[in-house]
Amino acid sequence: MSKSQPSASSDLHLLESFWKESIDRWVLPNGLTLIVKRDSSAALASVQVWVKTGSIHEGDLLGAGLSHYLEHMLFKGTEKRAGREISATVQAHGGYINAYTTFDRTVYYIDLPSEHVGVAVDVLADAVFRSTLPAEEVEREKNVILREIDMGRDDPDQRLGETLFEAAFKVHPYRLPIIGHREIFSGVGRDELYSYYKGRYVPNNTVVVVVGDVEPEAVRRLVDSHLGVLPRGRLAPVVIPEEPRALASRSDHRYEGVELTRAGLAWQIPGLAHEDAPGLELLAMVLGAGDSSVLWRAVREKARLVHSIDATSWNPGTAGLFYVSFTCDAGRRERATQCIERTLAEVTRRGFSPAQIRKAIRQLMVGEINTRKTMSGQASRLGAAEVVVGDLWFTRTYFDRLRKLSSADLVRLARTYLIPQTQTAVSISPLAQAPRAPSVETVRLRSPGFEEIRLPNGARLLLQEDSRIPNLHFRMAFMGGPSLEAPNRRGASALLATLLTKDTRRRTAAEVAQRIEEVGGSFGSFAGNNALGLSLEVLPTDSLRAIDLLGDAVLAPAFQPQTFDIERGAQLADLQQDADDVVTYGRKLLRRRFFGDHPLAIDSHGDPAGLQALSPADVRKLHQQVVVGGNAVLAVAGAFSRKELLPHLKKFLAKLPRKSPPPLPVPFDGPAANGNSVDLQPREQAVVFQGFPGPGAIDADMYVADVADELFSGMASRLFERVREEKGLAYFVRSSRVVGLRGGLFYFYAGTAPVHADEVLAEIDAEIARVAAGQIEPAELLRCQVRLKAAKRQSMQTNASRAMQAALNALYGQPVNDWLDFDRRIESVTIDDLSRFARTYLRAEKRVQVVVRPA
């Protein structure tokens, strides 16, 4: 091996520190398992309750969605708390509460400042084990979940997933949707739900995980006092039938009102504890992880048959699927499938190179590191190890197996599992492709701020050293976006950002992908309303490689016509996917009608006409305008030596042209035209939108808008309580924003049944009137402020998020470390400020209303 080649095995020592960490595990007398890990890197904690029951454990009511139903109901009231008190209590202490249901577990969690970990334990113990399931709430929440089921029917990606599992599994309960079948779920009563709750939610079927700035022994006493008093339950065994090995191929191809084909090929594989599991995950990485993967190169880059393609090894229980998924233009599915099958057959004959295996192991290693970036991520990792595998140190064994795998091992696995005779093929394609006989159906931050260095050419360099974990992030940002695009060339910003990660004068796109992925790194782009740029993340040992790649991308992009066509096609395909999602479709429609001819009417990904009109010359011209010294910010955060890295960073940035940044965007004082409109679509649900003017990123009212957005959103908001909890009118209702630099859009949206659309809109109007009148309780404001401050603390845990925030601050002319002053700014917002915000911005005469309803 040459010195320039990365050695995945040699870098696995970077994981050793994780496996040497102190983790405390206790089993209480009543059978409850408690896992605690102390991490004092930030004043945060994640408290998670893992109940070992999911949709496959529902016995005689399989397919009813009982587990998911309970997940909703456990926030509706307990023996000592009313439903609203649960979320209000958590948010009052700066926390975030949520839950999710899978096939084999239901997890309830609270992320919050670590000084309030006792609150999290108390609330979760109360909600998870002492809920009363009020009859009126059971019925109201049933209507909400029925709306959720209908919304799922409007999501082609979700429909494809359900189609896949229904086709691939004929006996195992994986064949049934986690949320349940509408017909079975509709018939579930409170007695059946309560019986399931009492039978499965017992301490001897529960794991509690706590990670954060805590004292393990103190946490043990807390959990013992709240949960140790619960009696051990009679836990009846649930027999999960094994899925017989498929003896023939299966397929289910559906034709619906979509614009883009979504498809997949799958094969049955054993569960996570099986000795072949590490090799199957490695095989999936080699075949379909990243732009240098086997399938990406063969099917997308060379054959140009798909817009996206990846491979996944999914096996959380005793059985699973190896899944190759792709999107393509209508009419190309069969050719893409044939190309995938030929490629699999070829690599099975030829084998895999040492470089491909090294790269995939490095990617898996980096993925393991990335799970440790946040307290919540660490807790989830420990919960999965305990609940799914039964071994807290499972990852060590897993990586020991990975390092021993060879090309011959991967070939054996491909020949054993990925065989045509047992393949399941599914797809959803546009109706036009259907055959004539169609198929059926106060921030306590432990990290210092960024150091700012200005270069003579105007470029700015931001540095923040943080050696907590072996991770290094580079974020290169430029002022850009819709305001710099020609009206008939929309989408150039996002396409430029993407192309900067592809061909350069020194390397092809495939070589760039290989260069970053072989060291387990990531190289991506971003483009928004006001900025565009690049992100690059590596292990600290690969810092010079990262700078080399970044410099090549920024200073010497090639904009090859073939790559341009491929990436423009992929961006067009993304727009088609957006059109298939009713919420995204409605949001874009509102944006166009609100902003009119202003550049913000269309986001940085553009529209089909603008993208089709673009040429490589257009993108090259935008690059020359944007990528100049006075418009460039490079933020570097993570584990690095300033002394060693700074000369290389300065040398790269000094090569940028010494030019001034482009002019700031034109302020927006909208809307372009107010009024109401209805758009008819072939959907089952309605989505309503109300849009109003809003402040921009550098406007004085930006922080007031932050608090207002929080006030109108979340499970503890008055709007949510009224519309969803009290009246059961909508599955979701909240506010959001489109933020320009100077001016923007503040809007409300909700998903509801068509018959309730007008009533939901009236409730939104009433809530705006309440806030405008200043009828806000001090506790409401405090909840919003505490929640926003805690959310900021949560969001700034990673090197990537801090680098992005600092880079944007620099671009927008704000203090680089302005985020350190976030608490004070949020605390300064008053009830009068919110009332003024509603009276100034959320005025009926400035409103644009859009309703997307079934045709």
Image (cartoon, rainbow, N blue to C red):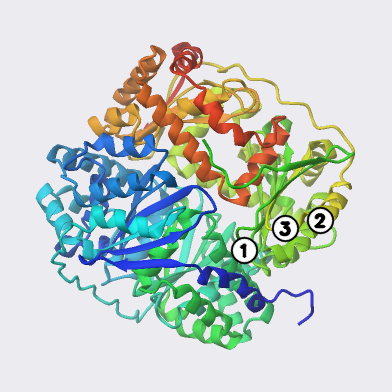
Where the C terminus falls, by quadrant?
top left
Q: Residue furthest left?
A: 191
> Which residue is label 1 attached to?
290
Q: Earlier in the sequence, mark 1 or mark 2?
A: 1
> Which residue is label 2 attached to?
643
Where the N terminus falls, by quadrant?
bottom right
Residue 371 at x, y percent in the picture: 51, 60
Q: In this view, does 655 lie above or below 37?
A: above
Question: Which residue is found at the position 60% from the left and 85% from the top?
Answer: 407
Residue 364 figure quarter: bottom right
Q: The disc labelled 3 sits on which kind of residue? A: Phe
Of marks 1 and 2, the one in the foreground: 2
Question: Which residue is found at the position 43% from the left and 17% from the top?
Answer: 831
Q: The disc labelled 1 sits on which kind of residue? A: Gly
Locate residue 381 relative to residue 289 in the image: left or right: left
Residue 138 at x, y percent in the picture: 17, 42
Residue 575 figure quarter: top right
**Labelled disc at residue 640:** 3
Q: The disc labelled 2 sits on which kind of residue? A: Lys
